């Protein structure tokens, strides 16, 4: 129960289903996971899941939506707080990247599934209704990336970020953080102090670059 | 036939099998792909594949090995050339990152499968023999990462890279490049000029950082 370990309250039935399903999809992939697998891991019947989600694909969309919602919920307030602190554009961008990194660590299973969604979208055979739903999720991912592009442009305008290609720079920065979904192990690096150290080092790499500054 | 489009010669049977299987695994994932799927895409019989590979897992390992070999074959000569050009440690690191990015673009399907290997290793149920083979591949990935760590330490020692946490900085940089396996589309961005522009912008983001330099 990695995801909610800091939550004081009990999980709702939907939260529990989404979390357990996210862990199953993360470990075995969408195709190799069945509703039976998810139910078994919950010590529940399939009926309990079907009560909320009509199909495995719907369950996948539910996780994807929740994963995106958690990223927005982390990054947008961090942006507002940093803006009120009146740092320059690069400082606000750094605060957003840091919040994103910490959210990736905290919601590891959910965000791992969000990544799988890209491949589904790219190659999958979907019904028109599912395609529409996936398009909405892709659109929400684009909006998320746009938050960082807009802030990069603001920082270029105030002179705190140099003359970079905004789109490629943002893809590279988000990739640098999101690759932690591949190597980060929640069970090994779970203290908040450790996560904050990791996040700070990653953001420093991206914002300051490796080349020594005078 | 994205991977070999610049190759002047015909593919050997093994090269063709590995390439087509890599495309299948990339598109549907390892679990959802059968040897039948690979054979169908090659317009061949299953026997042609089984002549060279005893199982789907062996095929997967063949792709993984080939993918790693191509990364080493790109990065090591780039390092030697840059060292002979007598740039500072950061310049050599930049040349290595650039060669890695270009190899990821060129061998997109192979390197997408290499990524899947991590998840297999993390959660998969393997026979002892397969586990040993996968451990060797993981070890080769570690050696690959070590090339960049060693160069980062050299660059820290000559003062061209600042006081970063080498391990986290390298993971972040490699992640920034390797995330292109998620967003890069060979069919859209296939000109060498376009790839080189992308690689240069990505490496600049990582080496120089976003924050404006005086």
Image: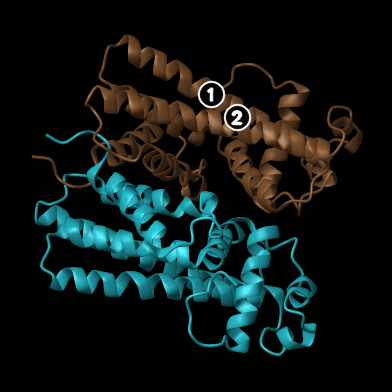
Chain colours: A brown, B cyan
Residue B198 in the image: x percent, y percent? 38, 53
Q: Is residue A13 above or below residue A199?
A: above
Q: Residue at x 80, y 84 (%)?
A: B45
Q: Nearer the viewer, residue A191 or A21?
A: A21
From the viewer's perspective, is the residue at label 2 or at label 1 nearer?
2
The answer to whether any part of residue A90 appears in the image is no
Q: Which mark is residue B131?
A: none
**Position of B176 relative to B36 (above/below):** above
Residue corresponding to mark 1: A72
* Image quarter (top left, top right, bottom left or bottom right) of the C terminus of chain B: top left
**Residue ranking furthest to the top:** A84
Quarter of the N terminus of chain B within the rendering: bottom right
A103 to the left or right of A169: right
Q: Earlier in the sequence, mark 2 or mark 1?
A: 1
Q: Is residue A211 left or right of residue B125?
A: left
- B82 and A14: which is toward the camera: B82
| Front-lying residue, B158 or B126 | B158
Foreground of the two, B70 or B139: B70
Reading the image, the residue beneath label 2 is A140
Using the rendered view, name the quadrant where residue A14 is placed. Answer: top right
- Numbered disc 2: secondary structure: helix
The residue depicted at 42 percent of the width and 50 percent of the height is: B175
The reply to whether callout 2 and callout 1 are in contact (CB within 8 Å) is no
């Amino acid at each position: 129960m990695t995801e909610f370990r800091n939550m004081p309250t009990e999980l709702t039935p939907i939260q529990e289903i989404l979390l357990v399903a996210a862990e199953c999809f993360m470990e075995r992939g969408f195709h190799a996971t069945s509703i039976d697998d998810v139910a078994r891991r919950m010590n529940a019947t399939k009926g309990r899941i079907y009560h909320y989600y009509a199909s495995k694909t719907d369950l996948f969309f539910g996780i994807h939506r929740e994963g995106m919602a958690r990223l927005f919920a982390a990054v947008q307030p961090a942006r507002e707080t940093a803006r009120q602190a009146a740092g320059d554009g690069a400082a606000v961008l750094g605060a957003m990247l840091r919040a994103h990194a910490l959210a990736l660590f905290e919601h590891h299973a959910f965000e791992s599934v969000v990544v799988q969604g890209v491949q589904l979208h790219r190659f999958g055979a979907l019904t028109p209704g599912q395609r529409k739903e996936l398009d909405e999720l892709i659109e929400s991912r684009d909006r998320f990336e746009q938050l960082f592009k807009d802030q990069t442009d603001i920082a270029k305008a105030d002179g705190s970020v140099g003359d970079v290609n905004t789109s490629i720079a943002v893809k590279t920065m988000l990739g640098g953080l999101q690759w932690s979904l591949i190597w980060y192990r929640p069970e090994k690096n779970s203290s908040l102090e450790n996560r904050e150290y990791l996040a700070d080092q990653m953001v420093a790499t991206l914002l300051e670059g490796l080349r020594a500054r005078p």
